[in-house]
Amino acid sequence: MQKNSKYLVNVIIVAYNHEKYIRTTLDSVLGQKTQFPYRVVVADDCSPDHSNEIFREYEAKYGDRLKIIRRPANVGVIKNLFSAMSDYRSCKYFAFCSGDDYWIDENKLQLQYDYLETHDDVSVALSGYRKFFEDTNECKDITSWDSPLTTCSGKKGIKSFINKEFSSFPMGSTMMLRAQEFVRLLDERKILYENKDIPGEGMVIYPILADMGRYSFIPQMTTVYRIHDGSLSHNKNEEKVLVFQIKYAIQIMDVSAFYHIGLFRRLKQIMMFVVSYFNAALNGLNKIYADTSSKFLNGEYCKAIKSTIRTVIFFENHETIRKPILFSLRLWHGRHSK
């Protein structure tokens, strides 16, 4: 940590068109009770709504404790987030909250700060949270997290994350992590996120954290995670969801290659890619799948997957062949997806 840093924790809020939610988010984050100084950094990605009027109101009230980054043009969530972290790295820890989520425990920051201060082998502290399904007003509380990531790190931890060995995907708005080492490793891995077509930041962030140390999960519920129509992972547009899934599958393969994950895992990813194609074909989306794959595939997997998809397209017109192949691939996927 830089000696001239005034704040021990910077809370990064990434916002875009969150006018409806941002007051609740800011109040919950700025209302934390801590025994250390912290600052809130909002990175607004050129929102066209009235968010900026709300930001000006809060700036006048909170002064230096609140910093608003106003992007002059939309840069996308990944560049918006990583640039904010790079610019405000002069702290000991980062915490995060999405512009449409909010915290429900006023001691959240202190709880995680104290934990990280006494557990040097832990790279990130997660916590319990509540899923709030906005369209139905239903809630689901997550107060436990089972994963080998809590006991391992390094390449073993990276492999565990890529293999999805966890009971639920780590929730970004709950986490606090070690800022200095994370940003250093993030800078060294720019090849993983310089491509504007990557679908999300998780496959960049979480393997780095696994490389740094083990994960921890504090069961105390601190955060509400809103799930609504604007959430990419819950989008109802089949074509958009399919394109996202293809890009995500490619991203997993690229990350696996970067960290030199074993051959079996890479073959498994190719097979899962093919199974996804069959599923898309059954829904009449096979052309979108093939076109999107051809557009975004590159590197060592490109030839193998394109060749496999061409074979699948050939088989698609032969009903007696297609059905047993589909059954076999699904059976293989069921055995190897855990």
Image (cartoon, grey):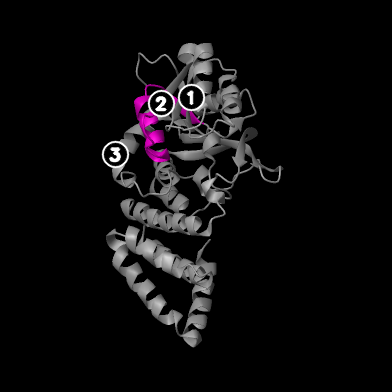
Q: Is residue 86 magenta?
A: yes
**Can you tell which mark lies on residue 70?**
2
Give the residue pinned by disc 3: 188
Observer-side mark, 2 or 1, equals 1
**Nearer mark to the viewer, of 1 and 3:** 1
Q: Which mark is residue 52?
A: 1
Would residue 218 be found to the left or right of residue 176 on screen? right
Q: Which stretch did the figure color magenta?
A: 69-96
Q: Residues within 10 Å of mark 2 (few under 14, many from 20)?
A: some
| Residue 29 rendering spot, x and y as whole percentages | 56, 24
Instruction: Residue at 44% x, 20% y: name it.
Output: 67
Helix, strand or loop status at disc 2:
strand
Considering only order in the chain, which callout, 2 or 3, is on the residue closer to the N terminus?
Answer: 2
Q: Position of residue 179 (x, y in %)?
A: 40, 29
Considering only vertical position in the picture, is 19 above or below 265? above
Name the element at disc 3. Answer: helix
